[in-house]
Amino acid sequence: MLKIPLGKSDFETIRQNGYFYADKTKFLYQLLAINYPFFLSRPRRFGKSLLVSALKAINQGRCDLY
């Protein structure tokens, strides 16, 4: 059974330590393909830091984490 990453917001840590992660990579690539500035507005505690961490991993070529 996978652990739930409560309080964890670093994408690489979550993937490397076997925490549950709902893979939204397809949507991240679509977001990056837009090539247009966007404003990300989400309520508190809804994964903004994790999203930014995942985008950072993608841009650094860390796709082996998927």
Image (cartoon, grey):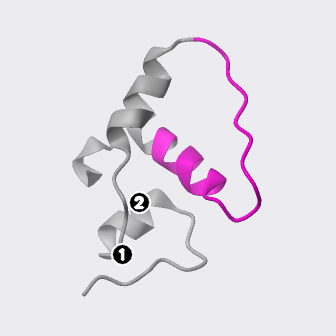
> Where does label 2 land, which residue?
12
Give amino acid for label 2. Glu
Q: Is residue 60 visible?
A: no
Q: Quadrant of residue 30?
A: top left
Residue 13 vs 36, above or below: the answer is below
Q: Is there CB contact under 8 Å for labels 1 and 2? A: no
Label 2 residue SS: helix
Q: Main secondary structure of the magenta part?
A: loop
The answer to whether residue 52 is magenta is yes
- Residue 19 tag number: 1
Can you give x and y, in whole percent of width and height, for residue 60 in the image? Answer: 41, 36
Can you give x and y, in whole percent of width and height, for residue 29 in the image? Answer: 38, 29
The answer to whether residue 4 is magenta is no
36 lies left or right of 59: right
Q: Which segment did they paint magenta?
A: 36-55
Q: Quadrant of residue 20?
A: bottom left
